[in-house]
Amino acid sequence: MPILETKSLRKYYRSGETAVHALDGIDLQVEKSEFVAVVGTSGSGKSTLLHMLGGLDRPTSGTVIVDGKEIFLLKDEELTIFRRRKIGFVFQNYNLVPVLNVYENIVLPVQLDGNEPDQEYVSQIIETLGLNSKLNNLPNNLSGGQQQRVAIARAMASKPAIILADEPTGNLDSKTSQDVLGLLKVTSEKFRQTVVMITHNIEIAQLADRIVRIEDGKIMGGGRV
């Protein structure tokens, strides 16, 4: 059974007098431990899709199933808890807490859920991402690439069902982008972590196991249903 699935997913809204079909019947399946890249031009619907997959916005109609749970049947508070436990996010602007050091940022989602982090697992992630020497640093003392590595470690720390990465190399130069995406792929393979990444960069997308193409709110290829 897929770890992530959408069925007839639609998101419509109005822009002035115009009805915008941001998503227009998306059927998508992602298997456990797959690394999937979703590509499309600006305005194609890929970021809207990511927000739906992560429960950050509710669809006009359709279903999103994460780890066997139809997430939009949950009430808002239940969805917030489910999202914290089952979905890890990596954004292009990192979203690190500036007053917390690297280690504190990494384990924050686990602690917010009232749990103690799995120290052995977190240590493996930190070592794989090359952050051992930076654990006491504050985010503003890190390079962009290092901050993105911290964001990846934080997303993985709670052992989520899926990681959703929204243009994770958008603020990085090409060399750092390749390094960060290479590490994301390594961690995905090493820890059997499912990753869905939104990107407009075809070169970056080639690192994924599968490429899904979306245009005008519809999947044009790679959806595998």
Image (spheres, rainbow, N blue to C red):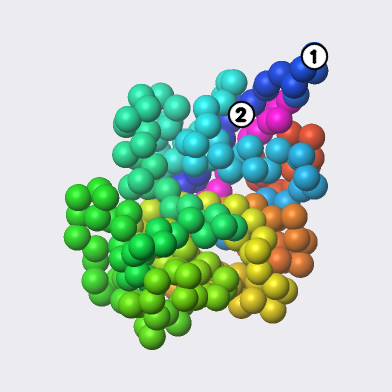
Q: Which residue is mark 1?
A: 17
**Magenta stretch: helix, strand or loop mostly:** strand
Whether tag 2 and tag 1 are in contact, CB under 8 A, the answer is no
Point 69% across, 79% down: residue: 175
Point 24% across, 66% down: residue: 118
Up/down of 42 relative to 108, above or below: above
Q: Quadrant of residue 126?
A: bottom left
Secondary structure category for the residue under label 2: strand
Does residue 25 belong to the magenta stretch?
Answer: yes
103 or 140: which is nearer to us?
A: 140
Report the span colored magenta: 21-33
Amino acid of disc 2: Leu
Q: Is 95 on the left or on the right of 180, as rendered?
A: left
Amino acid of disc 1: Glu
- Residue 9 tag number: 2
Most extreme residue toward the top is 17
Up/down of 106 relative to 129, above or below: above
Point 74% across, 34% down: residue: 217
Q: Quadrant of residue 123?
A: bottom left
